[in-house]
Amino acid sequence: MTKRNKELSLEQREELLGALKARFEKNMNRHGEIEWAKVQVKLEANTEKLWSINEMERTDGEPDVVGHDKEKDEYIFYDCSAESPKGRRSFCYDREALESRKKHKPENNAIDMATAMGIDLLTENQYRELQKLGNFDTKTSSWVKTPANIRKHGGAIFCDRRYDTVFVYHNGADSYYAARGFRGSLRV
């Protein structure tokens, strides 16, 4: 995509910033001492990243600030929807897995969609950090960044929360389910 395709109109920016601010204020437990005004300044100065946040929002990820890297002066956003984002479900893990399917191919794959959106899949550690902020994926599951040593054998990992515990599982990377999507992260 060209840079021009990754820009929001003034109306879209205002609507998105309003939604993000409302979510930020409603969920103060996620960001501690972070001030919304400083986050907004960063977002307004990074239009391409604001476009990526809009993609997270458009696909029902409900992005929110979950931290601040003081060394790099970057705010960290994660998808904070209660369940795996609806607009990113029923995908296999990556392009290789998608191409390996002979029948009943899913519409897309998690890695390619995340790349197109300008975000990264959560790692297992990031997923566990997210779960400290609330109860997520109690009915769904989410692909997470899979280590190369697992992926080279045809597998991929996903996580969910059941019985008040975070579980990490494996599946063939070419599998896909209506209740499995992926969660992303973005630094601004």
Image (cartoon, rainbow, N blue to C red):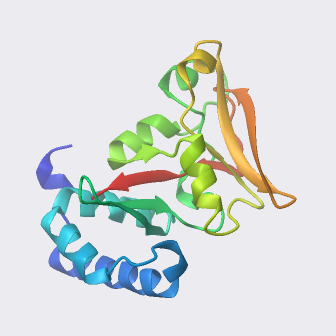
> Looking at the image, which residue sits at the far top?
153
Q: Is 32 displayed left or right of 146 in the figure?
A: left
Q: Is 45 displayed left or right of 24 in the figure?
A: left
Question: Where in the figure is residue 63, as x and y percent of width and height?
Answer: 45, 66
- At 13% from the left and 66% from the top, the residue drawn is 45
- At 61% from the left and 68% from the top, the residue drawn is 133
Classify 23 as above or below 55.
Answer: below
- At 73% from the left and 30% from the top, the residue drawn is 170
Tell me the quarter of the picture where residue 49 sits: bottom left
Question: Where in the figure is residue 5, as x and y percent of width and height?
Answer: 18, 53
- At 27% from the left and 73% from the top, the residue drawn is 39
Q: Is 154 displayed left or right of 15 in the figure?
A: right
Query: In the rendered image, is residue 171 in sight?
Result: yes
Q: Which is nearer the eye, 14 or 24?
A: 24
Classify 98 as above or below 132.
Answer: above
Classify 158 as above or below 75.
Answer: above
> Looking at the image, which residue sits at the far right?
163
Question: Where in the figure is residue 70, as x and y percent of width and height?
Answer: 29, 59
Quadrant in which the C terminus is drawn: bottom left
Question: Where in the figure is residue 6, as x and y percent of width and height?
Answer: 20, 55
> Looking at the image, which residue sits at the far front?
71
Classify 31 as above or below 123.
Answer: below
Q: Is 156 displayed left or right of 9 in the figure?
A: right
